[in-house]
Image: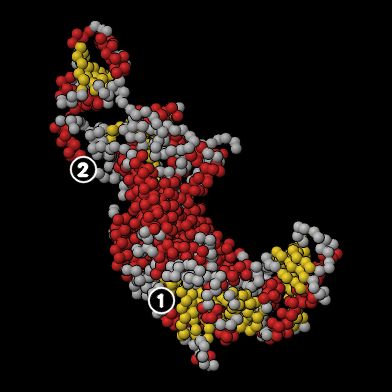
Amino acid sequence: MREKLHPFHVGLLVFMVQAGVVSIFLPRMLAQYMGYNGWVSLLLFSAVATFNIFLISVVYRLSDGKSIFQIIEQSLPKVIVFPLYTVLVSVWTLIGCIAAKQYILLFTVFVFPTTPPMYMKFLFDIIAYSLITKGIYNISKAATVFFWMVIWTALLLLFFLKGFEWVNLTPFFFKESSDVIVGGLSIFTAFLGYELVLLLFPYVNSKKGFMSAVYFGNFLTTFIYLAICLTCFGFYSFKQLTRMKFPLIDLLAYIRLPFVERVENIFIALYLVSALMSITMYIWAASETAQSLIPRASKRWITGVLVCGAFAVSWIPDVLSEVELWLKYLGYMASGIAFGLPLLLIAILAINNGGKKLV
Amino acid sequence: MGISNDTREGAAFMTLFRRTNRLPGKDARRDDNRPNDDADVPPSLQHTLDNFKDCMDLVHHAFPEINVNLVYFGHLVGAEELSRDVTIPLTNIRENEVQALLTRNQYKLTTNSKSLIKGILNGEAAIFHNDNVYLMDVYKPEARSIQQSETETVITGPHDSFIETASANLSLIRRRVKSSHLKVIKLEVGEVTKSIVYLLYIEGIANMEYVRELTDRINLIEIDAVHDGNMLIQYIDDFPNSVFPLFSTTERTDTAVSKLVAGRIVGILDGSPSVFSAPSSFFEFMASPDDYYQRWATGTSLRVLRFIALFITLTFTALYVSVTTFHYEMIPEALLLTITESRSKVPFPPIYEALLMEVTIELLREAGARLPTKIGQTIGIVGGIVIGQAAVQAGFTSNILIIAVASSAIASFVIPSYVMSASIRLVRFGLIIMAGILGDLGIALGIAYLVVHLSGLTSLNSSYLTPVSPNNFKDWRDVFIRAPFWALRRRPSQSRSPNLVRNRMKK
Amino acid sequence: MYKVLRLFLTVLLFGIVTGCGDQRILEKLGLIQTTSYDIAPGSDEDESKQKLLISVTIPRPDSGTGTGSGGVNREFLTAIAQTSKGGRVNLSRQTELQLVSGQLRNTLFGLSLAKQGIWEHIDTLVRDPSISPKVKITVVNGNAHDLLAKNYPFHPRTGQYIDRMLEKESHSQVVPSTTLYQFTKDYFDDGIDPIAPMIKEAGDNVKIDGVALFQKDRYIMKIEPKQALIFAMMRTDIKQGDLNVDLSGQNRNNEHVTLSSLVSHRSVHVTPHNGNFRVDINIKVSGSVLEYIGVLDLENDKDRSTIEKLVSEYVQANANEMIAVMQKNRVDSLGLGKNIRSTLHYAQWHKMNWPDTYQRIEVKFHVNVRIKDYGMFTK
């Protein structure tokens, strides 16, 4: 009795992987790179992501639910498969660990300026490891609970209805933008995470709901990002926003409840779970790939090695700016994978099928 | 103990003890009809008496004039039943009529020695006539009368609860479910105690896969004794190492019946008033029968209250520790001076202060539970005054902490299931320690780990977190709220019932 | 299998190993409640060489003398330093507590400092993650240190007293509630200039002394307290307020009206006008008259509309007066720039020099006062 993933859970899983620590500085990035009313450009990025998901859905349709590793291994020689897998494993593992490190370092900015971040990272990785070894079905179960733990905080944005001024938005669109290409790529990495559904093919139950769930997850991410960014653009003045390191945290810090103030302390801690989901899914993906690379190794062992490796690597960058730099380049690579992998698979499948089912 | 001095049996016990108690697996099904030496021995009076040698409570009656011997345990049989069904008929007949009498079908002819001995142990009277042995069920053990449950009380609703006698418990359920679809499977656990377990399910509502799985798991138990339902479930649940109870137990008849009609399997262990039901989900432990006996709005608010209580229990003290150790900026201005003032005399860091108080509360609770009610009350008063007043005045703890600790203790008792409430109280300690080390991040890490742990759990292979994940919004209306009955049309998804609709009324 | 136990032990072990460098145990903290910044007396005239006089108050529940009358239940520390954070180091040498700013509520700036510009100090505050964006910014008409240092006999804990007073007054819109967030927002916005409440010492009390108007971060001018409410109406919608009107300006001597429970709504219309702009600001005010001294009869509909008209004129006259001064001083505290910006293209907006244009634009106020009711007792 092996459980299959229900579309709803796939949707939430995609959302939880996509939405991560980035949302904390996303408004600033939009203001910095996209200029006035940069939040509108989110729709554009979302459209790109949606197109990417469309590519994945083509792969899914052509593959008949076969695992992508099967497809690749059937058609490509070992010489190509081996380095390809190695790249996938390393990029995904690194993204997972560096994203986690970024979250931890972010936290140390606020609360634990002198506690060694690697200690917190260690606890974090233990949790990630114990989740990954439970398998994708349980990961998705945890993702669902985490989703409910996090999503209600979006309601806190209602708190800003009062301070929101349309006039702050200005009628200017994308003026004073800078580094549109490079910045745009960085912003696009905020949407990454959906590409991992490529690995979910063998684990989903219903054929028709699966891809719409992925679209739904992406839509949800877009919606939440839009809500956050629109609020920031309307609540802060543009120039101010470009100078704020962590607009979302500032936003939360503004909330004052009768029994508790400065709720951002609780909420940054709470957003741990979305960071946790990102690292979990990326390392899970890496370990799935590693498993096809070394079919005889036990999964637990592979995961253990990957998590330890990730932990070791995350020693290297030790200040936030370094981590951000790493993450930028890893983001480019992951974006490359997100587009390249489905295209490769479509090509393979198209050749295999003689182009019959492509339409 | 004088149970048996049969050396072969004794040796068999020893080997069983040496076997490791393992998690029941599908393929490891035990062959229930394991050949036993006794099975081959034809039943005889001599063999029986040998078997019960040194059991001085055994009654042996001889009727030499009709060539009949009667063997039974006097304290297991009802005097009235014995005389009505056995002694009086036997004393009033002649030898040639005995055979005719014993062929009446209430007298069971027994052909093997093992079942004979088992019968006698189960309160049947053995009638030896010539070479034949008949068993007559005259079982009537001494039993506690049916009373109100002390651990699960409700304000309105039925007040009867299960007792230690399985037959009485069965009767309580049968009286409520007058249906031939209520099926009962009889199983046996405990190599020494041979306790009987009845598995109840309603045919057509319960998923037979669960029934099979549960039967298999119970058959796999190889242990000398099982004393209570809560103990039994630890041998058969999916994750014996988890802090949380994976099957729910109840002493209440109405609860057990409601689980049955919801499509769950109910198990009764003879000798225990705790009846378990499976599969269960985490959220099932938050429900109380009271929710259904009151109007839906009241029921809903009770449910919500309990989830708030769960939150308070888990996090209140931890938040206190976290805020006073790391996140002073979270304190609102109005409370700032009060908290600072009450903390200023305390000599320990908040984490030790909190652990000290939490342990004290647990001591009080445990002492109260162990002592007779009247002394327990004294403990409560003394504890309350000493801890509450004196500790604060002596500058041992801050009074804000007392509020936090007390409210989370009270909140923990709002959770209807005692076993669950104890588990959650234990988990709370973990969170407090995490809060003391890493503040809010520690709490978040702790809760994240908790969720990861919970999502790995299954109850009879079904997700422990149903209906949150796998998500089933329809079930939510009977989990987080108690919707009006017209809205509760389906059985919970967890029971995977072949007959999902339970309410066919038009609005 | 004993994962839980293992995790628990790891956590415990690490907890012991890492120690408590980042602990902020409440009673060991000096929770700064109010900070004041001044130019240190006797400083150089040259701005770059000036030193800063920084004072902080820390409420103490248990200061030896107790909470009885005259008892001091706050700690007051002062230091002179080059920068504000440098001052912190200096301050913490004076106390056994660890100074933290997470509970900072209010910052006071001395007038002379405010005139030089306060952004570098605000920047330090905004940068510090432990400081709330809701910290108030207040200008002291005079010396902030002296105001804060003084113990006011009827108000124990000076810092808290000022904070609560500002809170109350900003609730009734007499002064704006300027927070770090608000100030930073307006500072960076090119279509508005920041404002802040102003207070001054008045014998045994502290008194609200109007509104300080900034140009960028430099204090330029102030609005008198009696005009503050009208200023608020010009600036934003108000939900509650009391307006005392002396009608002598409208040629009616010895007539006074007090409007209570004022609610006002403001709308701004911008029309381009001969290469310039004309800004129409409509202010709708409604309130109840609880006090009227004069010859008119409140019962009489006609008389009442006369009063409405008179009050409207009064408000309008005050508004015109204020805007004229503001335009002269080139402070756009009403944020008219934002409204004009909304009607323009990016290039147009950036081509024109807003502070210059601001001086030239035509601002018209249209005030419409309605009397909702006039009390529960007739003459």
In depth, the one of B448 and B496 nearer the eye is B448
Determine the image quadrant of residue B130. Answer: top left
Same subunit: marks 2 and 1: no
Q: Residue A100, image x and y in percent? A: 40, 67
- Helix, strand or loop at disc 1? loop
Q: In this view, does A150 lie above or below B34?
A: below
- Cα–Cα span, label 2 and label 1: 68 Å
Q: Residue B84, image x and y in percent? A: 31, 14
Q: In this view, does B264 lie above or below A91?
A: above
Determine the image quadrant of residue B443. Answer: bottom left
Amino acid beneath label 2: Arg
**Residue A107 visible to the viewer:** no
Q: Which quadrant, please, contains the C terminus of chain C?
A: bottom right
Amino acid beneath label 1: Thr
Q: Is residue B93 above or below residue B43?
A: above
In depth, the one of C117 and B456 nearer the eye is C117
Residue depicted at x 34% and y 41%:
B375
Residue depicted at x 37% and y 36%:
B275
Residue depicted at x 31% and y 59%:
C7
**Residue C83 visible to the viewer:** yes
Q: How many labels does the image show?
A: 2
- Helix, strand or loop at disc 2? loop
Q: Does B71 sit left or right of B435 as displayed?
A: left
Q: Which residue in the structure is indicated by mark 2?
A: B19
Residue depicted at x 74% and y 80%:
C321
Q: Which residue in the structure is indicated by mark 1?
A: C95
Q: Which chain is disc 1 placed on?
A: C
Q: Residue C230, image x and y in percent? A: 71, 73
Q: Does B341 sit left or right of B28 as displayed?
A: right
Q: Does A356 sit left or right of A282 as displayed?
A: right
